[in-house]
Image (cartoon, rainbow, N blue to C red):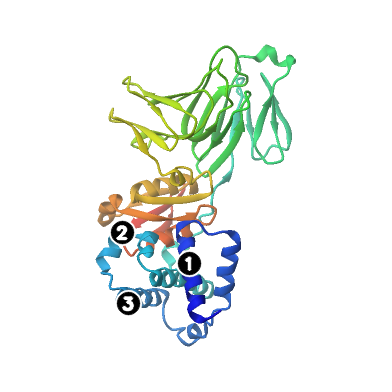
Amino acid sequence: MSVQEQSNRIIELARKWTTGTISNEEIAEFNAWYNDFDDTVLEEESEETVAELEARLYEATVAQEGISRRSIHRISLWKCISVAAAVIVLVIGAWMLRDRLSAENPDRNTGISQALPSGGNRAVLTLANGRQVLLDEALKGEVAVEGARVIKNADGLISYEITANDRKDSLAVHTVSTPRGGQFSVVLGDGSRVWMNAATTLRYPARFTGNKREVQLDGEAYFEISASSKAPFSVITPDQRVDVLGTGFNVKAYKDEPGTYTTLMEGAVKVSDQNKHNAVLRPGQFAVAGKDGSFNAGAPANVKAVLDWKNGEFVFPGEPLESVMRKIARWYDVEVEYSKNAEELKTELYYGSVSRWGDARDVLDVLSMTGTVKFSINQGTTRKKIIVMK
């Protein structure tokens, strides 16, 4: 392969990486190229700091492409990289060089040196009789019997098996709660499956009876509903109700968000709020019931961003920093504090994607690469705290 062909291939892989379309095989190809890269120049320039290295690469890229610092400064994060192939390669190169130099110099950024590991599969099942079961610690097999047999399978999720002997507790209501930094998946008694994001509570009957199926949700969950024309399925949140027959959809109903969001992936749902507004969504559309009483429905949704948590990612499609930090706070179980000069950054838009299975420092490093924001991590009184600085 000629030098030009290799360059074009690396640019193609870099574009795929930044847009989230790169395959595992292509990641391996990119890594192989990087591992074979001649980095003796780094040894010769060991006195140069990471910040100086990144600044030099950045300025060289800007000069080559004729892009103003202000234009990149405003559009932020990986989105800016798509304006030119050279920008993609140099910025990814700077990111990878940062990692390599970090291993040699662990004190490269004392402000974010404290580890913040990602969340995991953690939840508590509360039975109608008050008994609680730590689902992440429970062994595979039967974990409870009340209205139905509650089974934990090899994949870690729980499901319900209903037998004739369970009739005496047919009205039992169960609650599964995930903590900050937790997620979990439940298969309900009717076969519907629910994926729960961090800091989420789901209340539901151990077994559905009659002509309706209702669950209550605080937090965020993705639902795949088992179809039944005789018993419609409803998700009830403090500000919104979603009625379905059989479909896949996401509901985001956190108390610290400005509204409750329902996004439809397939099928059809009817969404209504407390002010008697309602709308029927088509696949790919979303509705939001604002805490200020507003109601909007039918706009196209960024499905990849809506389901990022379910797919193990953070995806920011032009998302305000304040919203980004709420996601980080829930998943890494941290507090977020803005310094006085950083309040104006709350509305700054950020673009890009990064795995949420890594340390929080990986996410913060990517965000800080825009040059608009900096972070430090402090040990708070109850949990670690991320300080946002300008």
**Residue that appears at 43% across and 84% down:** 47
Asked whether 242 or 42 is in front, the reply is 242
Disc 3 target residue: 64
Task: Judge whether residue 374 can be spotted in this image.
Answer: no
Looking at the rendered image, the disc whose residue lies closer to the viewer, 3 or 1, is 1
Q: Earlier in the sequence, mark 2 or mark 1?
A: 1
Which disc, if any, is residue 75?
A: 2
Q: CA distance from mark 2 to mark 3?
A: 19 Å
Q: Are marks 3 and 1 in contact (CB under 8 Å)?
A: no
Residue 108, above or below 238: below
The spot of residue 76 in percent (x, y) is 33, 60
**Looking at the figure, which quarter contains the C terminus?**
bottom left
As helix, strand or loop, the secondary structure at mark 3 comes to helix
Residue 96, above or below 243: below
Q: Earlier in the sequence, mark 3 or mark 1?
A: 1
Which disc, if any, is residue 267?
A: none
Q: Left or right? Give the position of 287 relative to 357.
A: left
As helix, strand or loop, the secondary structure at mark 2 comes to helix
Q: CA distance from mark 3 to mark 1?
A: 19 Å
Image quarter of residue 210: top right
Q: CA distance from mark 2 to mark 1?
A: 22 Å
**Residue that appears at 46% across and 72% down:** 93
As helix, strand or loop, the secondary structure at mark 1 comes to helix
The amino acid marked with disc number 1 is Glu
**Residue that appears at 49% across and 30% down:** 267
Asked whether 372 or 340 is in front, the reply is 372
